């Protein structure tokens, strides 16, 4: 498959690389790494990494304006996103062919060629393999972005998707390109004091049920008081892993622009994406999210997650009781 994808890339002169809306480091880094690798290998090709920019990821690279491809045969490569409706910045039907490189469970079939590897830590891991296994070229910048995506999406090699292959790739990146880990970890983990204070507020005030489900409804008043933004606030969910009394946890915040509740869910016990799918959500087995219009459904979702924790404790992990 990697060889076929390489040949397809070789064939097209105009290539657009897109990822999901509301990008995370893996989404951003995977599109830059792939774009820069293709440009390095084929300097005459026009390759674009598109989508709405996010200020905190500016140091990862520069995004391109979406080109008008309606009158030419162009290739679209979609990275790190399983469904067409969440692709940012492109008109899907304008493209002659589509390649998908993703590590989320399959949702929409998109194109002719695809690598969907749910066992991969990140889209960046899939792209690193593609580059190493074909004639695609790499430089320090590409290697840095690949490292950022892998380290971030594997939660610094904590999540169960971290495999011997993840470590082999990372080892090769560090070794061959002499990566400055201090610089890269600063890019990933430096945070404003306000965010850190807000994290402590969440730790002090979240509810923890007897089944090991922790949750917090983040109101706009809380967000205003601490001077954080709502998406950062619910992304702090990633920092609540490995609390002994908590096996699944969720933070919800209200997105005023889109007029819906965004729920971020994590687990180290029950599988949660099957529950999230019922609430206009999805994602990975243990890292998932949902978008909910009606506030009463938020409570229903939390109830279901709490029950999932109860079942998990009773059936899979009886020694807790
Ligand atoms: Mn990802």
Image (spheres, rainbow, N blue to C red):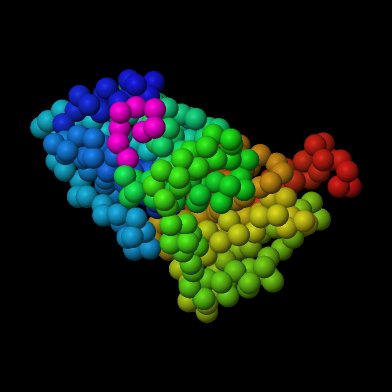
Instruction: State yes or no: residue 132 in magenta.
Output: yes
What is the magenta segment's predominant secondary structure?
A: loop
Q: How many marks?
A: 0
Inspect this view and state whether residue 92 appears. Answer: no
Q: Is residue 64 placed above or below 124 in the rendered structure? A: below
177 or 137, nearer to the observer:
177
Residue displayed at 58% across by 47% down: 157
Q: Which residue sits at x=30%, y=36%? A: 137
12 or 280: which is nearer to us?
12
Residue 213 counted in the magenta span: no
Segment colored magenta? 131-138
Looking at the image, which is closer to me, 1 or 181? 181
Percent of width and height locating residue 111: 33, 25
245 relative to 301, above or below: below
Q: What residue is rendered at 37% in x and 38% in y?
A: 79
- Work out which quarter of the rendered image holds the N terminus and state it: top left
Where is residue 260 drawn, in percent x and y?
47, 56
Residue occupying the far bottom of the picture: 225
């Amino acid at each position: 498959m990697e060889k076929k994808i390489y040949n397809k890339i070789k064939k097209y002169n105009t290539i657009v690389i897109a990822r999901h809306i509301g990008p995370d480091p893996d989404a951003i880094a995977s599109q830059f790494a792939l774009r820069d690798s293709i440009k390095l290998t084929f300097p005459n090709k026009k390759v674009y990494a598109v989508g709405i920019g996010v200020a905190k990821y500016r140091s990862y690279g520069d995004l391109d304006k979406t080109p008008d491809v309606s009158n030419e045969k162009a290739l679209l490569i979609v990275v790190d996103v399983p469904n067409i409706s969440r692709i940012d910045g492109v008109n899907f039907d304008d493209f002659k062919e589509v390649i998908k490189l993703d590590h989320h469970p399959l949702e929409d079939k998109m194109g002719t060629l695809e690598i969907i590897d749910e066992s991969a830590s990140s889209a960046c891991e899939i792209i690193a393999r593609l580059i190493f296994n074909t004639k695609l070229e790499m430089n320090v910048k590409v290697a840095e972005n690949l490292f950022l995506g892998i380290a971030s999406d594997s939660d610094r090699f904590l999540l169960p998707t971290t495999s011997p292959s993840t470590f082999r790739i990372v080892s090769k990146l560090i070794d061959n390109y002499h990566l400055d880990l201090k610089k890269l970890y600063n890019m990933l983990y430096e945070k404003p004091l306000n965010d850190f204070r807000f994290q402590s507020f969440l730790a002090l005030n979240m509810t923890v049920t007897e089944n090991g489900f922790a949750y917090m409804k983040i109101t706009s008043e809380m967000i205003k008081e601490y001077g954080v933004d709502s998406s950062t606030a619910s992304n702090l969910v990633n920092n609540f892993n490995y609390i002994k009394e908590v096996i699944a946890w969720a933070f919800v915040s209200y997105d005023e622009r889109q007029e819906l509740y965004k729920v971020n869910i994590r687990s180290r016990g029950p599988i949660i994406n099957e529950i999230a799918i019922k609430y206009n959500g999805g994602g990975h087995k243990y890292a998932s999210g949902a978008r909910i219009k009606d506030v009463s459904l938020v409570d229903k979702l939390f109830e279901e997650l709490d029950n999932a924790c109860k079942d998990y404790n009773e059936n899979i992990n009886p020694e807790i009781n």
